[in-house]
Amino acid sequence: MIPEGTWDYFCLDNVPYHGRVMTILYDKTGERYGKGKGLRVFADGHLIAISESLQRVRGTLPFFVSEYGGINNQRDIPADIVVIDGK
C-alpha cells in the first residue's frame, strides 16, 4: 500500500501473473512515462485498468494463445489486479 502524496510515480514491469506479463504504473502528472495521468495496469501490453488516482482497480485479463497452441480463456476471471489504499 502506498499512501497518497508519497510518490509521484512508480512502475512495476514484467510482473508474472497467471501466465501473463503485467505492467503496473502510476504517474501523477502523466509526464514521466507518457502513458497518461494516473494509475494504469497492462496485461501483455494491453491496457486493462485505469484510474486517475491511486485507488483499487479491477481489470479483466484478455484471451491469449498458450505456448502449447491452446487458447486460454481467462477473460472471465475478474481479479483485483491492484489494490492500493490511498488513505
Image (spheres, rainbow, N blue to C red):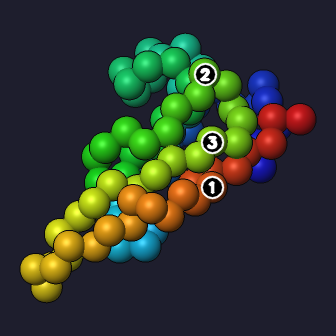
Q: Answer with left or right where residue 29 lies relative to residue 15.
A: right
Report the residue marked by disc 1.
Answer: 80
Which secondary structure lies at badge 1? strand
Tell me the quarter of the image containing the C terminus: top right
Q: Are marks 3 and 2 in contact (CB under 8 Å)?
A: no
Q: Is residue 19 above or below residue 86?
A: below
Measured in 3D between alpha carbons, the distance from the residue under mark 1 to the one under mark 3, in whole angstroms, is 7 Å
Q: Position of residue 46 (x, y in %)?
A: 31, 43
Which secondary structure lies at badge 2? loop
Task: From the image, state whether disc 2 or disc 1 is nearer to you.
Answer: 1
Measured in 3D between alpha carbons, the distance from the residue under mark 3 to the one under mark 2, in whole angstroms, is 11 Å
**Disc on the earlier residue, 1 or 3:** 3
Report the residue marked by disc 2.
Answer: 52
Q: Position of residue 27 (x, y in %)?
A: 54, 26
Amino acid type shown at disc 1: Asp
Within-10-Å neighbours for mark 3: few <14, some 14–19, many 20+: some
Marker disc for residue 69: none
Q: Is residue 74 above or below residue 69?
A: above
| Residue at figure coordinates x 70%, y 42% from the top left | 56
Marker disc for residue 57: 3
Measured in 3D between alpha carbons, the distance from the residue under mark 2 to the one under mark 1, in whole angstroms, is 17 Å
Task: From the image, state whether disc 3 or disc 2 is nearer to you.
Answer: 3
Q: Is residue 46 above or below residue 60?
A: above
| Residue at figure coordinates x 67%, y 25% from the top left | 53
Q: Position of residue 42 (x, y in %)?
A: 40, 45
Amino acid type shown at disc 3: Val
**Disc on the earlier residue, 2 or 1:** 2
| Residue at figure coordinates x 70%, y 50% from the top left | 83
Q: Are marks 2 and 1 in contact (CB under 8 Å)?
A: no
Q: Are marks 1 and 3 in contact (CB under 8 Å)?
A: yes
